[in-house]
Structure formats: structure tokens, C-alpha cells
Amino acid sequence: MSARVLSILLSLALAAAVVMSAIALAFAVVAPLVGQPLDAGFSVACATPGAPPCSVEPGTDGARFTLHEGELTLTSSSLAATLLRVLDVALTGGFWIALTGLLRRFTRHASGGRPFTPATARQLTWTGLLLLAFPLWELIRSALWQLIVLMEQPLSGRLIHTFAAAPAPDAIRLLPEFSPGLAVAGLVLLVIARAFAVGVEVQRDSDEIV
């Protein structure tokens, strides 16, 4: 794939990320104002694996849970849930916009015939740091969502946070969200960025010799 085609694809991806993020943010802000509660999904598991009572029928107290491994869907219009949802949409959208923007700029700089430049090394570094930061935000977001869900307790005290001891065999444990693949990709990009920084020094020394 040529650098021109890749640059066009990244430009389209950037435009799509901006449009989709704007629509999602507008929906997250407007929906509660018109009385439309939004659903939030959480990964859950039985606190005691193999316990047969660990299940919830669809629609019970606004939640849905699939036996052992599944998703709890909570419908809520509380202020805390709305603010967190808006913050989540804004940060997640900003992440994808920044990521595609950095990759687009890197492609344009690298296609100039001299890929080892301070600009490309800096862009790779920021991209790697961004990929490392997003999983950290996922953990923070999970902790905040668990706090909100436990405050509302839609299942009569059966919900427990990730590290809590199971109070009953039918307890439902909320699981954190984490993307290890993004963290690994971020570390790989930081290593490549360091190699590019060394390449910049080598190329500068070569230019001085010539």
C-alpha cells in the first residue's frame, strides 16, 4: 500500500472518528435532558463459580445477567451516571481522534523520503504513550462505574465490586475493563520510537560526514 493511499485512509478514519464522537457526545448529553435514560453495560461473573443460583432473569430490576460469564445492563438516568457517561464518550472519542491524527501525521512525515526525523520519533512516542494511557483510563472508568452501580444497587445487595469477598453464593461480581493489547502495542511503539530517535542521531552524523 502506497503512502498516499494510507494517508487517504487515515484521513477518512479521522473524519469518521470526529463525526461519530460528536454524534455520541450529543446523544449522551441530550438524551437525559429529554427524559431518555441510557443503558450501561458491565462485564460480570458469579462470585462463586459453579453456584447454580447465580443468575438473574431478563428485566429483573432493570438488569440482565447471563449465567457465570455475561453482561449486566443497567438503565439509569442519575446525574452521576450521566456525567460519567459524557466524560467517557468525550475521552474515548478524543483518544481515537488523537490516535488517528498522530498516525496520519506520522505517515505524511515518513513518506517524505527521510523517515528518521525528530518529528516522526516524537509522533511515535506520543502514540505509544496514548496507547498506554487508554487502558489506564479503562481501569479508572471501571472503578467509577462500579461505585455508581453499587450506590444504586439494582439487585438488592447481590452486586459486589471486583475485589470484595463473596457475601453469598449467588453474589454477582463486577469485572473491570482492561485492554492489554493496547498496552502491549503502546510499549512496542515506544521501543520503535526509541529506535527512530537513534536513527535520527545516526542520520545526523552521516549527514555531517558527507
Image (cartoon, grey):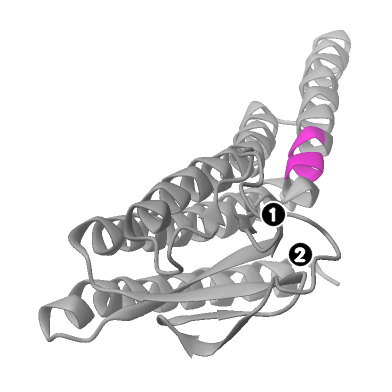
Q: Residue furthest left?
A: 33
Judge by depth and name the residue closer to the eye, 194 or 140: 140
Residue 51 visible within the image: yes
Percent coordinates x, y for residue 79 in the rendering: 19, 60
The amino acid beneath tag 2 is: Ala
Quadrant of the drawing holding the C terminus: top right
- Vertical position of residue 61 compared to residue 111: above or below: below
Location of residue 52 with respect to 176 vertically, above or below: below
Residue beneath the point at 83% across and 59% down: 49
Q: Is residue 186 magenta?
A: yes
Residue 90, by quadrant, is bottom left
Number of numbered discs on residues: 2
Instruction: From the top left corner, tell me how far across and down residue 190 is, in percent.
Output: 76, 30
Say which residue appears at 74% left-offset and 41% top-offset: 183
Task: Tell me the element at label 2.
Answer: helix
Picture coordinates of residue 42, whole percent (x, y):
56, 65
- Find the magenta span and give its range: 183-187
User: Who comes first in sequence, dot 2 or dot 1?
Assistant: 2
Q: Does 71 sit left or right of 50 as displayed?
A: left
Residue density around tag 2, few if under 14, some if 14–19, many if 20 or more, within 10 Å: few
Residue 178, how many percent across, how many down?
68, 49
Q: In the picture, which quadrant includes the N terminus?
A: bottom right
**Which residue carries the number 1 mark?**
107
Magenta-drawn stretch, dominant element (helix, strand or loop): helix
Mark seen at residue 3: 2
Residue 210, compared with residue 120, is above or below; it is above
* Residue at image point 77% right, 55% down: 48
